[in-house]
Amino acid sequence: MSDKLTARREQELRALEQRLGVHFRNLGYLNAALTHTSYANEAKRHVMHNERLEFLGDAVLELASSTYLYEHFPKLPEGELTKTRASIVCSATLAKLAGHLALGDALLLGHGEEMGGGRTRTSNLEDAFEAVIGAIYLDQGWETAKDYVLRQLEPEFARVRLGENLQDYKTILQEIVQRKPDRHVDYVELRATGPDHDRSYEFAVSIEGTVYGTGLGRSKKEAEQMAAKEALSKLRK
């Protein structure tokens, strides 16, 4: 964590600290959390990227969210706790939260990744969000990292309390569309990105040939659900 930050980079990270609500003792951790492997690979010197911090942050995220659900939803059985946690920390949610924090703007990317739209790529945003959690944990410890996670996830926990998070959007959309005979819902894969062990998918959903929504996810099922959710929102409007 000894890389010297430029004055401009330090100013950028200090502004991000304000959005995060966390003041780092070692700003190098935050810088590493926002350094993509493509940037590190193109650097002419050794640069720490965010993959290891992502691994650590993922563990912190899972424990913090699991602890919260265990303590605040005592009537949920183990299976429902697992399903609820998965719905909360899904790829789409983490990328959305990263977007709200403008993490994409602060990413250090290699030239190819930059030109390929890396700042808005779901997998990059999700990874950065988890890496920032890992950075906070290393710099500030468990309590600060846990508090940060719970602040970020509070809107999702609120949806759990309202019973909105576990809806099967595909089934709901199908039921609405089939109220009119002979209408059909179709899901089409638009693209798949990333290596085989870490794929991201984008799907579109159409009704009688008209696209009503698109969705992103780490699995095809998740992407279809997100597309159906967007379609439902448009139909209800």
Image (cartoon, rainbow, N blue to C red):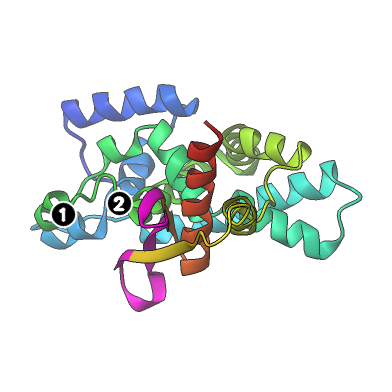
Report the side of 63 relative to 182 (left or right).
right
| Residue found at x 76% / y 36% | 162
Front-lying residue, 145 or 68: 68
| Residue found at x 26% / y 27% | 12
Q: Which residues are magenta?
A: 190-212
Mark found first going from the N terminus, 1 or 2: 1
Q: Position of residue 152 (x, y in %)?
A: 56, 35
Find disc 2 in the rendering and name its residue: 121
Q: Which quadrant of the figure has residue 132?
A: top left
| Residue 138 in view in this figure | no
Most common SS among magenta residues: strand
Front-lying residue, 217 or 123: 217
| Residue found at x 21% / y 31% | 9
**Could you tell me which secondary element the residue under label 2 belongs to?**
loop
What residue type is disc 1 on?
Gly
Q: Which quadrant of the figure has residue 78?
A: bottom right
**Residue located farthest toward the right when viewing the structure as drawn:** 75
Instruction: Tell me if label 1 and label 2 are in contact, CB under 8 Å.
Output: yes
Magenta segment: does it hold 193?
yes
Q: Which mark is residue 116?
A: 1
